[in-house]
């Protein structure tokens, strides 16, 4: 039996409710807006928050790209694309520059985003204060009072223990000089891409029922101390073994036979496009 879906899965009332929450999030950069997270045909924790944002915003003329930790063909990315395509019929692409909506888990594309694009990030834990305060009531009060000493204390404890800030991902940021925000589990390498981004960045947490946003050209600063400045992952002297790119976020892997370290672009579509460009130049 053929099952008929409304365009983009949700009924129009659900889309309007999510859009209203999204508009409020855009109007108050970095502020977590509660919303009525819907049941989805995928489990919570697998990107339902980002998917709900995408489905509420997508139109018939949009082009979608889905990323899972830099890859376009991982289980999470493939299944999200299948659901969106089945309920909308829109086109999907691997090239970030060709997409109007980019939904991503754990990465921001290497290609700089444009004003006509929307980046949707999947978020597991939207509350940056949750690591030291379990009460939702208290974290709301701390945000209202701009009381973020606990977030600074966690970074200070890392410096005392490890000699530097040891956040591998989800390093907290200050948005518009007001709200401390969890940028989702993107690597530190991607944090600077949020600052003054030309594209609208939306963040959705389905399990926690929160959406928040960074409007275009918004100031975003990673938390750091004057004597211990924020630093991204370093790949100095390294290049991608496939396309030869430098100054990008790379994965390291060890050859079992030689025990030598090798590096390659984490963003697989960027890597392929750079390889194609290099081959064209070489004739």
Image (tube, rainbow, N blue to C red):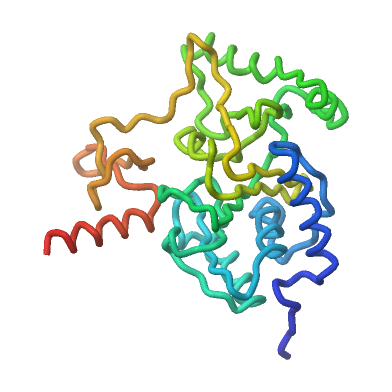
Residue furthest left in the image: 283
- Tell me the residue at 51%/35% (across/down): 191
Residue furthest bottom in the image: 1
Image location (x, y in percent) of residue 99 = 50, 63
Total labels drawn: 0
- Tell me the residue at 40%/30% (across/down): 233
Image location (x, y in percent) of residue 210 = 76, 45
Image location (x, y in percent) of residue 206 = 74, 51
- Tell me the residue at 28%/41% (across/down): 246
Q: Is residue 214 left or right of residue 71?
A: right
Viewer-nearest residue: 190 or 49: 190
Location of residue 74 with respect to 259 vertically, above or below: below
Image location (x, y in percent) of residue 262 = 26, 41
Q: Is residue 257 left or right of residue 174?
A: left
Q: Quadrant of the N terminus?
A: bottom right
- Tell me the residue at 85%/67% (across/down): 13
Residue furthest right in the image: 137
Res. 11 image quadrant: bottom right
Q: Quadrant of the C terminus?
A: bottom left
Viewer-nearest residue: 1 or 181: 181
Viewer-nearest residue: 126 or 173: 173
Q: Is residue 71 left or right of residue 118?
A: left
Location of residue 56 with respect to 69 vertically, above or below: below
Res. 141 image quadrant: top right
């Amino acid at each position: 039996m053929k099952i008929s879906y409304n365009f983009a899965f949700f009924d129009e009332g659900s889309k309007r409710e999510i859009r209203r929450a999204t508009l409020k999030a855009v109007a108050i950069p970095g502020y977590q807006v509660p919303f009525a997270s819907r049941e989805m045909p995928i489990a919570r924790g697998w990107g339902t928050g980002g998917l709900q944002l995408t489905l509420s915003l997508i139109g018939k003329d949009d082009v979608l790209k889905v990323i899972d930790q830099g890859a376009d063909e991982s289980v999470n990315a493939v299944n999200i694309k299948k659901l969106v395509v089945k309920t909308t019929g829109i086109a999907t692409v691997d090239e970030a520059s060709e997409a109007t909506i980019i939904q991503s888990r754990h990465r921001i594309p290497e290609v700089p985003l444009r004003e006509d694009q929307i980046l949707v990030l999947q978020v597991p834990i939207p509350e940056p204060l949750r690591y030291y305060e379990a009460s939702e009531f208290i974290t709301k009060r701390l945000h209202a009072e701009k009381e973020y000493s606990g977030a600074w204390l966690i970074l200070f404890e890392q410096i005392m223990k490890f000699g530097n800030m040891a956040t591998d991902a989800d390093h907290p940021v200050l948005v518009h000089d007001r709200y401390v925000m969890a940028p989702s589990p993107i690597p530190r390498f991607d944090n600077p891409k949020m600052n003054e981004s030309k594209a609208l960045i939306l963040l959705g947490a389905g399990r926690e029922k929160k959406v928040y946003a960074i409007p275009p050209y918004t100031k975003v600063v990673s938390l750091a101390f004057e004597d211990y400045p924020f630093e991204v992952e370093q790949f100095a002297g390294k290049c991608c073994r496939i396309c030869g790119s430098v100054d990008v976020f790379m994965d390291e892997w060890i050859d079992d036979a030689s025990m030598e370290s090798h590096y390659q672009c984490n963003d697989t579509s960027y890597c392929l496009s750079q390889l194609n460009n290099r081959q064209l130049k070489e004739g």
